[in-house]
Amino acid sequence: MHKHIWIINQYAGSPLHGKEYRSPSIARELVQKGYNVTIIAASHSHHFKTAPEIEGRYTLKTIDGVNFLWVKTKHYTSSKSYQRLLSMFEFLLKTFFIPHHDIGKPDYIIVSSPSPLPILNGLFFKKKYAAKLLFEVRDLWPLSVIELGSMSPKHPFIRFLSYIEKTAYSKSDAVISLLGNALPYMKSQGLEEKKFIFLPNGIDRKLLNNSKKAPEKIIEQINNGKFTIGYAGALGIANDLYLLLDAAKKIENYSDIQIVLMGGGSEEEKLKQYAFTHKINNVIFPGSVKREEVHSILSLFDVCYLGLQKSPLFYHGVSPTKLYDYMAVAKPILYAIDSGNHPVKDAKCGIEVNSGSVDDIVEAILTLFQMDEKEREELGKNGYKTLMKHYTFDKLTNRLINQMEAL
């Protein structure tokens, strides 16, 4: 009989409904390797592009060989709203009563954050079914909430999250971290080092194989013969794109260089207004494309930009999905993140600069612009080789299986 894995992830997406894609990508690889996998997720997420069709409190469907059990939860309008917080508790409570007899007993349970609350579901089902429990940590809650300044460490909810975190580290059979430098912090919260598994983000080969061409009108906007520093993703405050606009203003005399901000999001209109107000004329905003069209746009860039605002949280490491998308098109990367890990430097696939420094970004842009084309190609090839060797989801899933089966 095939071993059965439950993945409890409130915000898991699917190929039909949108991101997030990590859990379904790993699940599909597990299915291809002979496991039976059920993803338990909420029916509503702010990440969905298309919501799943729900039939009652629990809806079970199969996509790409992976079983999806959607738990019906209420809609919320903002990722930072109290309604979202309430939906976390709703998902927690309803997951205790899932029709587990219909989906089959688990041999392994993977509980994936950012919401840490479902670890309580995982602990319950671990005991009920004598299953092995793995806790996947994407964000260090409650540390993230504290460091971002939204709540005091003494707040009752933070104390509650701290209790859950320490319980999870103590009672789980293994803890998976996307953050390569998170072990010291986790050990300070009671995690035994032997339980730690580093499993970063990566790229789904299926997505690469099914890549499609973006609309011609968008391609024509970008592909105009200029040297292009490009960003593709959410236009949000965390990505520190105003810094890139300030850098664009400083290099406006270089008429052969353009900045492309590809995507949509909460800051899109504000960024456009900022560029207009400051007369930044060497930046274009082509809009958004479908997920399967992203790589056709990235291939038009000469350099791919990745930045984040300064935060002490990043000392524990980062693993942004965009990094692996950039590596996939073999382009040099301009990396403006102060993090405890150095993926671009380690892979020799671009230039790392200090987060928050416009002058450093300008210097890196001009260095890459003036670099011999073959040298830039070599940087891109280094990133692609590193990706294919270490960061495809089939490779990452093999690592997970080896660790999981050893428990």
Image (cartoon, rainbow, N blue to C red):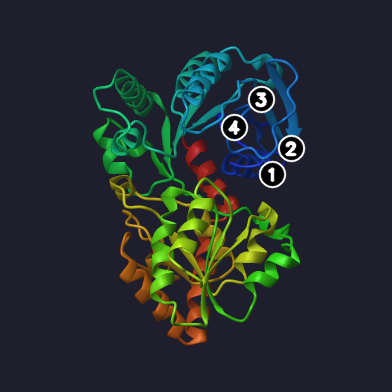
Residue at 37 percent across and 49 percent down: it is: 180
Q: Which residue, given by chain and number where applicable, does mark 1 sit on? A: 32
Quadrant containing the N terminus in the rendered view: top right
Residue at 74 percent across and 37 percent down: it is: 65
Q: Which residue, given by chain and number where applicable, does mark 3 sit on? A: 70
Residue 159: image location, x then y, percent: 29, 21
Give the amino acid at mark 1. Answer: Gln
**Label 4: which secondary element:** loop
- Can residue 182 be seen here? The reply is yes
Q: CA distance from mark 4 to mark 3?
A: 11 Å
Q: CA distance from mark 2 to mark 4?
A: 22 Å
- Can residue 206 be seen here? The reply is no
Query: Residue 38 lies in what quarter of the image?
Result: top right
**Disc number lying in front (4 or 1):** 4
Which mark is first along the chain, 1 or 2? 1
Query: Which numbered circle lies on residue 65?
Result: 2
Q: Are marks 3 and 2 in contact (CB under 8 Å)?
A: no
Give the amino acid at mark 3. Answer: Trp
In the image, 99 versus 401, the foreground residue is: 99
Q: Which residue, given by chain and number where applicable, does mark 4 sit on? A: 45
Q: CA distance from mark 1 to mark 3?
A: 22 Å
**Disc number lying in front (4 or 3):** 4
Which mark is first along the chain, 3 or 1? 1
